[in-house]
Image (cartoon, helix red, strand yellow):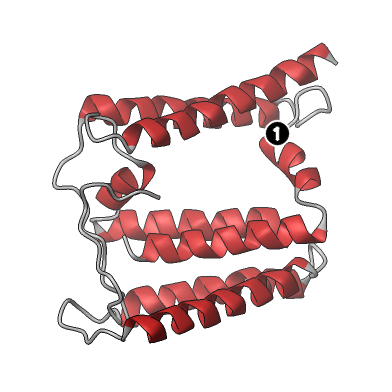
Amino acid sequence: MAADGVSRSDGRLGRGPGAPRLPAGRRWVRKLVIGAGLAGYAWAAASAAPFTSVALLCVLLPGAVIAAIAIWRPPARIPPPDRLDVTGFSYWAICVAALFEWEASAFKDNSLWWHPALTDLINPLIAPHPLKSAAILLWLLAGWALVRR
Amino acid sequence: MATRVITIIGFACVIIALFALEIIGRRRTTRIPTLGEWLGYLMRARAGRAAILLGWLWLGWHYFAR
């Protein structure tokens, strides 16, 4: 996710603008440790069989952590733009609406083989364990990116 | 077979368009916001923030728990 023209906080511990900064070396170590932890979690979560309580927990746990961070320990947030160009945003709205419409038409047809839903196309792609792990890692990083917005 | 291919091409076109918008949005001289910018704008309000985070959670449940 980009933040061109938007100020970023660099190396803050995340409890407001006055929070102390870690030295650059320790920041890297911290990032490496967190990255390794997330990758390990993604790898473990990808081995959970679908439709099981373990798989559900593997999704709910990051959700609970993100919610707890957002509520009790919010990180320094990337300031949102003061206003949004309606014309510029409309391109996004059209594309997102088209995606939902295309998906909805597959649902309407009961997601038949000849008109698959996006899920039917993506699930086989992320079936191999490394790819599913990568997808889960991406999802976790997206959650962190969202909580900073 | 042809119908399936058309459906897949439809999805591919929309997804490519979304990536293209993100790339265009990163240029300084454009009016198109990046994904992060418009999501951030929607998340200014508490309700928008909750809705976007719930959408993220739903995505994880849909693809990884089911």
Q: Residue at x 44, y 66 (%)?
A: A144
Q: Chain of mark 1?
A: A
Q: Position of residue A64 (x, y in %)?
A: 50, 76
Circle 1: is it few (<14), some (14-19), or many (20+) Cα within 10 Å? many
Secondary element type, mark 1? loop
Q: Is residue A99 above or below residue A120?
A: above
Classify residue B17 as left or right of residue A6.
Answer: right
Q: Residue furthest front?
A: A25
- Quarter of the image containing the C terminus of chain A? bottom left
Q: Nearer the viewer, residue A68 or A37?
A: A37
Q: Residue at x 30, y 57 (%)?
A: B47
Classify residue B30 as left or right of residue A70.
Answer: left
Q: Nearer the viewer, residue A30 or B53?
A: A30
Q: Residue furthest top?
A: B2
Quarter of the figure with residue A25? bottom left
Q: Nearer the viewer, residue A5 or B62?
A: A5
Q: Position of residue B31 (x, y in %)?
A: 23, 29
Numbered circles on residues, count: 1
Q: Residue at x 61, y 63 (%)?
A: A137
Q: Is residue A96 visible?
A: yes
Classify residue A126 as left or right of residue A90.
Answer: right
Q: Is residue B21 above or below residue A53?
A: above
Q: Position of residue B55 (x, y in %)?
A: 49, 53
Q: Is residue B66 visible?
A: no
* Residue under pointer 1: A117
Query: What amino acid type should be assigned to the residue bearing mark 1?
Result: Ala
Quarter of the figure with residue A49? bottom right
Q: Residue at x 70, y 42 (%)?
A: A119
